Amino acid sequence: MVGFISPLLLLALLAVPLLWFLLRAIPPAPIKRRFPGVALLLGLMDEDREADKTPWWLLALRMLAIGAAVVAFAGPILNPKAVVAGKDPLLIVVDGGWADAYDWPRRIAKAASLLDGAERAGRPVALIQLADLAQPVAFKAAADVRGKLATLVPRGWLPDKLWEFSIKSPLQPFETAWISDGLAHSGQDALVEALAKRGAVTIYASEKPVYALGAATPAEGKLDVTAARQPAGPATALVLVARGPDPSGTDRELARAPLTFADGALTAKATLDLPPELRNRVTRFAIAGQRSAGAVSLAGDALKRRKVALVTDAAEGEGLQLLSPVHYLRQALSPTADLIEGGVLDVVPAKPDVIVLADVAQIPGAESDALMDWVNKGGLLLRFAGPHLAAADMAKLADDPLMPVALRQGGLTSGGAMSWGAPKALATFAEDSPFHGLAIPGDLRVKTQVLAQPGPDLAGRVLAALDDGTPLVTRKVIGLGQVVLFHVTANAEWSDLPLTGLYVAMLDRLAVSASAQAATVEGLAGLVWVPLRVMDGWGELGDPGSLAGVHGAVLANALKTGPGVDAPPGLYRHDARMVAVNAVTPGMALVAAVWPAGVALSDLTLPVEMALKGPVLAFALLLLLVDILATLALSGRLRFGLKSGGAGVALVVLALLGQPHPSYANVADDRAIAATDGVVLAYVITGDTAVDAISASGLQGLSDQLANRTAVEPLTPMGVDVEKDELAFYPFLYWPVTADAAVPSSGAYARLNKYLRTGGLILFDTRDADMAQAGDTPEAAALQRIASGLDIPQIEPIPEDHVLTRSFYLLQAFPGRFSDGGLWVEASPPDAVKADGMPFRNLNDGVTPVVIGGNDWASAWAVDDGGAPMYPVGRGSAGDTQREYAFRFGINLIMHALTGNYKSDQVHVPALLERLGK
Amino acid sequence: MTISADLRARAEALGQTLPPLLAEAEHLAATVALGEHGRRRVGMGDDFWQYRAARPGDPLRSIDWRRSARSDQAFVQEREWQAAQSVVFWVDPAKSMAFSGGKRASKADRARVLALALAVLLLRAGELVGLSGQESPRAGRGQMLRLIEAMALDLARSDADYGAPSGGFVNHGRAVFVSDFLGDMAAVEASLAQAAGRGVKGILLQVLDPAEEEFPFDGRTIFVSMGGSVSHETQRAGDLRSRYLARLAERKARLAELARAAGWHYLAHHTGEPAQAALLWAYRALEGGR
């Protein structure tokens, strides 16, 4: 499918054959050649006059090129967006629920494409999102709707009660484009019917399935998470991710499990077997890679830590700890549960999830009633046998409702000194037991137990049994709760069970199943639930903002039938309780939408519009290039051009490959010439542009002062790269040390050392005013790094009689921007002695190769283009003096670099003495 | 000879290229002339050549008494032949000579170098050298400068596409024609006939560019002579190659035949080759004819 932006231009193609006649008569232009031998050519006729006319293939080539150019300028477009035919307004309907979120960009692109089409046809457009509340539909110009389209976001719920939209739909005829999520929603049929009455309806639905993740349900210690999809497709392997805060509080992935849809299956189940510590932390489950609120399941309270109450016989307070019936329970439960200990009446008001009665035989009436009430409401009463229970009056106990089974008087001891038979092992857990699947340690033995009175309902209450069939754990359901009895003690007295991991696992499974309380209407009603976190359509939890509290009834409704505008998905809180409202409710089924006959169905694929103008034009150009070559070949110019042309092509290719580097040798030569034209002060380029600029202007200032005051008239200072540039031309290098200065390469060190050995002088400036005192600033560290590779002699703080103090000016301080930093120079020879009557020692040899300090001299010297100081130094006139001394130091330094120890000669002593006033 | 100021200026401008040419020519002559000494023949001259026994008829005056006194026989002292020849050069100053098919020196340069080198050799040998159409031949080193000046004048004066030799022969002298001989053959023929009539012998040195020998052209081309007076257009220059080469061969054959008929020597020389061979050949050809 190729369309044209301006198809009328194609008429120009009709003129292309004219070229045949025009160009055919014009042969390629001849070359004019100076040739003395022409005298011999006179009168020679061409054997073949055919070449007088342009060859047909060259003509065809040119016509093709011109034709291609004409086609290109007509603006060919591959797969042009179809103009939506018709003049009626266009209603674009977007479901806009979470089921749209996973391929929202495609839906928006589709809507935009429809908008474009409508705009080209000049049709008014309206856009509605069904997940929002119904609003009256008003048709506007497409450009006005575009803004609204850009701001559409998917909601965290699904569209509902669509008949409300049909009421609000306008009465005029219009066409409808419905970008559907492919699911059936309530009132959908009515809306389609209403829309179909106004005009044609086209449904655009994605071919990809919608995934919905149900809530996690604790099942016998593990977590089952079910997911559904619509439509069913081939087998798909997804990944379920459990997320929650890690111990540091950061939200992260805690576990993942495969979630595999069988081929054609609508649902899949993932099972997570998490350690309790992890499970307590899980806040939500999500399908990895599915960006949709439906693919996220908030965990809420359901997986939280349990509250377990331990009730023991009050009389055992003085027993040894390891013999305490609840010691092992405490050890087993304390990591995963909140433990309460006390009497029955103390713990029941705390509303524990579990109450453990360890070897408590007789429960007084009041306590029994309280317990009964609590169990009826969903509590789990966990009882353990023991000597007291075994010794209790079984006749009384038989009608105790808080005992799962009737017990026989006394216990059964096996394997003891006074008994026959060996201790019993555990039988494998039955399939319907909550303990099913737990591994039984082979060395687990039960020595003593209480026996259940055989009865008709005993078999149904046994959760675990010994290998001789006698029950070990029995359970009775009372109301919403249950009573579980371990027929052994909670400690290791009667059996090895408390010593094994199986004990913990059994307790865990019982405790988990104990608190899976569904949030019921009764539990929520009458309270106002405050939204804590709200989930948007993408499945992201966000701040609820100004969202008002939600009434319990509404919340319960949302929990049952799915969230909506009035109760968006998220976490709601009331006091200590937290309810998670998920986008997918437990009973929700994903039902595929069924569209009535007469509705056009389409998918979301967009025609990829591709402008061909560029490629076609390039093709035409290519043909013209070929034409040039062919013409050259025809006129005989190509043969001659091969040699020089080849070189030309090579040059062009080289030029294309990269600008030919200006010969470095030339640059270096120019530099060398510039540097040796006169005295040039140089600074080391640090790579820090600010520092380099200060260095340049500082040395310029110093150069100006030198020219003003001394016979030295330096040229413009130069920056040198110690890695590349020749250093020998510069008598003086200023090296500002930055904290992040790179250590020079070994080649650079070699050159620097040669420079120092052959009389160069480097002024290292750490610019921190601190180097002399502490030496631990970052710059000082950098200086140590750099200097470690340099061939620097031993240094010392500048002595009073150093030649630097008198090489031009008489100085005793060397301030820059800072005035209190010290100055280090090469140590004077130890045998230097001061002659009598002389102001300084006899130090005639050597120029210090390095001067190290931190007074930031360049900043003090720095002048701008007008010669004015660039950086403040000190305050007021004291600052001016300091700057003056900075200049004097600079001049002394350059003089020292240029004249060496000339001023150290004793010849100058009388003059110096006079100036010193001695 | 009056020379207009303009002509003088042009001649001087052109002549500026000649001193290097002269240097080149001297150099060339030095390489070639090694070992070429004297005439090694009896004749008129100042230098002693040999003694021979006096024969009847020898004038008494010619008997060398000093030699004869040392023996019983009378001897006659013979002198080396030293009669100077007049050699007139015609170096084609036409524009066609300015052609160069590549980055080589032009034909004119080569022609002048050869002519000057030959002149150097000849002057060294004591001959009289002059330029056709100019002053009469003279001997001596100073003549080189005059030759150069005259050549420059010739160049400046010439605006023809193809040159034709002018007269100015010295009776029984020698002539050296250096040209590409691509122009009208009639003038050459007439010149040779005139020369033959005056007893002048000489050499025809045809200097050609390799491009003229190979005709490496193709495609649609308009060939224009150097001065622009003659042009020829062709659609396929490549097709003309064989016929052009045939004509060139014919021209060379004609020149060789003319030379033979007049007792002259002919050589075709290419600017692509070294000049020594041509110089050597020219020198020997001139010497042989004497």
Image (cartoon, coloured by chain):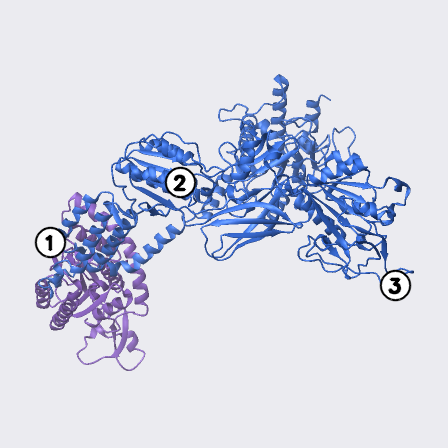
Q: CA separation, marks 2 and 1? A: 68 Å
On the same chain, marks 2 and 1? The answer is yes
Within-10-Å neighbours for mark 2: few <14, some 14–19, many 20+: many
Name the image quarter holding residue B199: bottom left
Q: In x, y percent, where is residue B263?
A: 14, 72
Picture disc at residue A188: 2
Within-10-Å neighbours for mark 1: few <14, some 14–19, many 20+: few
Question: SS for tag 3?
Answer: loop
Query: Does residue A624 appear to the left or right of A559 in the view shown?
Result: left
Query: Does residue A15 appear to the left or right of A629 in the view shown?
Result: left
What hue represents chain B? purple
Name the image quarter holding residue A25: bottom left
Q: In x, y percent, where is residue A816?
A: 63, 27
What's the residue at 69%, 54% (across, down)?
A433
Picture disc at residue A420: 3
Q: In x, y percent, where is residue A292?
A: 50, 43
Q: Earlier in the sequence, mark 2 or mark 3?
A: 2
Q: Quick check: can you spot residue A513?
A: yes
Picture disc at residue A21: 1
What amino acid is at disc 3?
A: Trp
